[in-house]
Image (tube, helix red, strand yellow):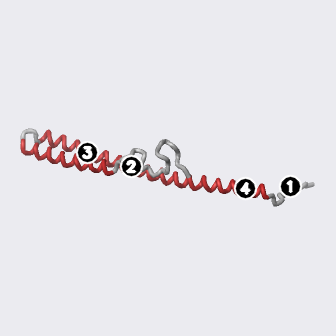
Amino acid sequence: MRIRVDHYVHFEDDPTTAAAIARIEALLNQVIIKEDRQMADLARLQTEVAENGDAIASATTLLEGLSQALRDAATDPAAVTALADQLDAQTNALAAAVAANTPADPNAGGGTGGTGEGEPPTE
């Protein structure tokens, strides 16, 4: 013998319940939008960190090469002067690049939408 029990739940059209569900859906959509923005910000930050790592590695290689070149040219005053001039030029270029990519206000330029005072982004 088999017994089958089916249970159905029916809701009448209740305006209060429909309004509450609509609010929940709207809030859920806002959460999804904010999550998408945060993921895009995270991806951008990961790219910037990788680029900074590449720049640091390049600067390290440059400085190590200049150090060795100075050691190699220690007995030739003209070569030392030329290397010092090259070092000055490269130092100025590096300083200009850092200055060009550094916001005047440390809280500016983050692109996160926050207030810049340690507060989370506002939406």
For disc 2, the marked residue is 50
Q: Quadrant of the N terminus?
A: bottom right
Drawn side of residue 105 relative to residue 85, left or right: right
Q: Amino acid at mark 2?
A: Ala
Labels 4, 3: front one:
4
Q: Which is nearer the N-term, disc 4 or disc 1?
A: 1
Q: CA distance from mark 4 to mark 2?
A: 43 Å
**Could you say whether the residue bearing mark 3 is in a helix, strand or loop?**
helix
Task: Report which quarter residue 11 is drawn in.
Answer: bottom right
For disc 1, the marked residue is 7
Q: Amino acid at mark 3?
A: Thr
Q: CA distance from mark 4 to mark 1?
A: 23 Å
Query: What residue lies at 78% left-to-right and 55% top-to-bottom?
Result: 16
Q: Which is nearer the N-term, disc 1 or disc 3?
A: 1
Q: Which is nearer the N-term, disc 4 or disc 2?
A: 4
Q: Position of residue 12 (x, y in %)?
A: 84, 59
- Circles 4 and 3, Cβ within 8 Å, touching? The answer is no
Drawn side of residue 122 relative to residue 98, left or right: right
Q: CA distance from mark 4 to mark 3?
A: 60 Å
Seen from the viewer's position, the closer of residues 87 and 115 is 115
Q: Which is nearer the N-term, disc 4 or disc 3?
A: 4
**Could you say whether the residue bearing mark 1 is in a helix, strand or loop?**
loop
Q: Position of residue 6 (x, y in %)?
A: 87, 56
For disc 3, the marked residue is 61
For disc 4, the marked residue is 21
Query: What residue lies at 81% left-to-right and 58% top-to-bottom?
Result: 14
Q: Position of residue 98 (x, y in %)?
A: 30, 48
Q: Residues within 10 Å of mark 1 (few under 14, many from 20)?
A: few
Seen from the viewer's position, the closer of residues 108 and 98 is 108
- Circles 4 and 1, Cβ within 8 Å, touching? The answer is no
Q: Residues within 10 Å of mark 4 (few under 14, many from 20)?
A: few
- Circles 1 and 2, Cβ within 8 Å, touching? The answer is no
